[in-house]
Amino acid sequence: MRLGAPIFDKYESGEEWALLHKKYGYRAAYSPVNNKDGLHKKDEFIKAAEKHDIIIAEVGAWCNPMSPDEAERKKNIEYCKNQLFVADEMGAKCCVNISGNLGEPWDGHSEKNFTKAAFNQIVETTRDIIDSVKPKRTFYTLEMMPWMYPHNQRSYNDLLKAIDRERFAVHLDLVNIIKSPVRYYNTPEIIRACFKVLGAYIKSIHVKDIFMSQEMTTHLTEVIPGKGNFNHKCLINEVRKLDENIPLMLEHLPSKEEYTEAGDYIKSLF
């Protein structure tokens, strides 16, 4: 299984970067470069990753290509294209973003996000990004979110069909769609349903956990893996049925120590 996480230690070269991943038992990595880095730096990290058998899991394109501000929207779409180009150069498993918010903040919710117009805009925008770059080695993906498309496996499948591009695929973040007590207590069912519908398209997976307090009304909080109710063993079993090289990427933890704790927990389930 390909576990990965951010690296907190300082490094001066691609070789040092790769050796740090091996030190922590990571066989997948977040991209160490972006669209502002030169070809020499990209080549250095590509060679180091290949030498040490590290997969570049994803290049983030985190921005709002659905911004209601036209200038901001155009700038963000251009950024997505640039990051997709980097992902293709790096041979990353995917370039990932959210679909975007028709309101503010960039990753928040809006009454317009579940409209047919929003769906159509996502289709048009995603096609534009992919068609402009024409990636050969990577895929553009959208992370599922609780308050915008795609928000479950069915809406993601609807987008796969509507966008209709070979280089559009799936980035899976299952904790993001645990958004009710019913779903909280049925994570194996949700995991299996997502893999049944989307499995063939999955390129990278975020690994997190979630905890529901007893406070009214419903309060769901992201926590370190192993401290919540998410069934990571079920997730790992579903990944094994597909491809054990799919990256499982830890995220959103504040310290190296917590990433080490989370990594040890996930590796104990392999």
Image: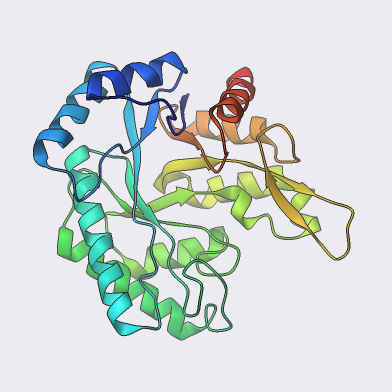
Image quadrant where residue 223 sits: top right
The colour scheme applied to this rendered structure is rainbow
The residue positioned 26% from the left and 62% from the top of the image is: 79
Give the camera-side residue of 246 and 160: 246
Q: Where is residue 113 shown, x and y percent of the image?
A: 52, 78
Q: Where is residue 74 shown, x and y percent of the image?
A: 26, 75
The residue positioned 58% from the left and 83% from the top of the image is: 111
Look at the picture and state if 262 lies above or below 133. above
Look at the picture and state if 28 lies above or below 143. above
Give the camera-side residue of 203 and 58: 58
**One can see residue 53 in this view:** no
**One can see residue 200 in this view:** yes
Identity of the residue furthest to the left in this view: 40
Q: Where is residue 136 shown, x and y percent of the image?
A: 17, 47
The residue positioned 23% from the left and 24% from the top of the image is: 13
Image side of residue 190 versus residue 66, left or right: right
Image quadrant where residue 55 sits: top left
Give the camera-side residue of 189 and 29: 29
Quadrant placement of the C terminus: top right
Image side of residue 264 versus residue 159, left or right: right
Image side of residue 218 versus residue 169, left or right: right
Q: Where is residue 68 shown, x and y percent of the image?
A: 40, 83
